[in-house]
Amino acid sequence: MSPSPRKRALVLFDLDGTLVDGQHSVQATFEAIFPKFGYPAPSKAAVRAIIGRSLPHAIADLLGDAAPVEAITEAYKTHFHAMRAGEAYAEALYDDVDDVMRRLAKRDDLVLGTATGKALRGIHWLIEQNGWQGFFATLQAADTAESKPSPEMVHNACRDTGMDPSDVIVFGDSIFDMQMAVSAGATAIGVSYGYGDPDTLRQTGALRIIDGFVEVEGIIAAFMEGTLDA
């Protein structure tokens, strides 16, 4: 049976670890906030493991549900927003991300969106900093849906764009991204250059693993042609 090509696809991107390298800012904020509540600063490995989760869930994963998660969340937000307001603050895009995103945004056969543990405020900041206004038809974030690995971000994005989950491809670096995509009925693509382990990404549902963002267009082409899993 010959593959069935798609006329349109919804492409959802995780942000931290997929489009931007934000772990250093996240780590610095945890290191500043946790001691104020009597907790030791988390290790870099522990922080890498929770990036992708919505902030309250990430804090609970690090400290346990008995911790004052709500208070720590608010302290984190205050510190992080103040840090981001500084003139020297930047979140570095991974190699080739800006060029590829600009090409994808011009295509009529693609609808772009985000599925991230960041809050909407953080997404809008990233869009403004990179001149990506108008690129995304749907913004799914920590304050629009349940935290990954819940499939709600994918479902909401489909609702916003009129797309079916079978026509959705998700790019992410964490097991939460892969689990979210698979449970929603979407196609999961892992990235090896982010914060997740490639083998673990495969085990949790990644159909393919890419080693650089420049490979995104080739993956999308195969997805549109119906040959990605061939």
Image (cartoon, grey):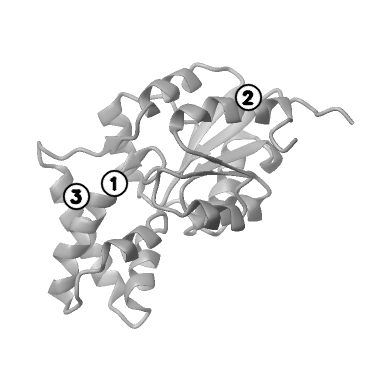
Quadrant location, the N terminus: top right
Count every numbered label the image shows and give the total: 3
Identify the amino acid type marked 1.
Gly
Q: Which residue has dot 2 on it?
A: 221
Q: Residue furthest right?
A: 1
Circle 1 packing at 10 Å, graded few (<14), some (14-19), many (20+), is some
Please name the residue shown 18% across and 57% down the image.
Answer: 28
Q: Which residue has dot 3 on it?
A: 81
Please name the residue shown 22% across and 50% down the image.
Answer: 25
Q: Please report whichever mark, 2 or 1, sits nearer to the chain's N-terminal start.
A: 1
Identify the amino acid type marked 2.
Ala
Residue 163 % position (x, y): 65, 35
Q: Please report whichever mark, 3 or 1, sits nearer to the chain's N-terminal start.
A: 1
Q: Which quadrant of the view contains residue 212? A: top left
Q: CA distance from mark 2 to mark 1?
A: 28 Å
* Lateral position of residue 25 relative to residue 47, left or right: left
Circle 3 packing at 10 Å, graded few (<14), some (14-19), many (20+), is few
Q: Are marks 3 and 2 in contact (CB under 8 Å)?
A: no
Identify the amino acid type marked 3.
His
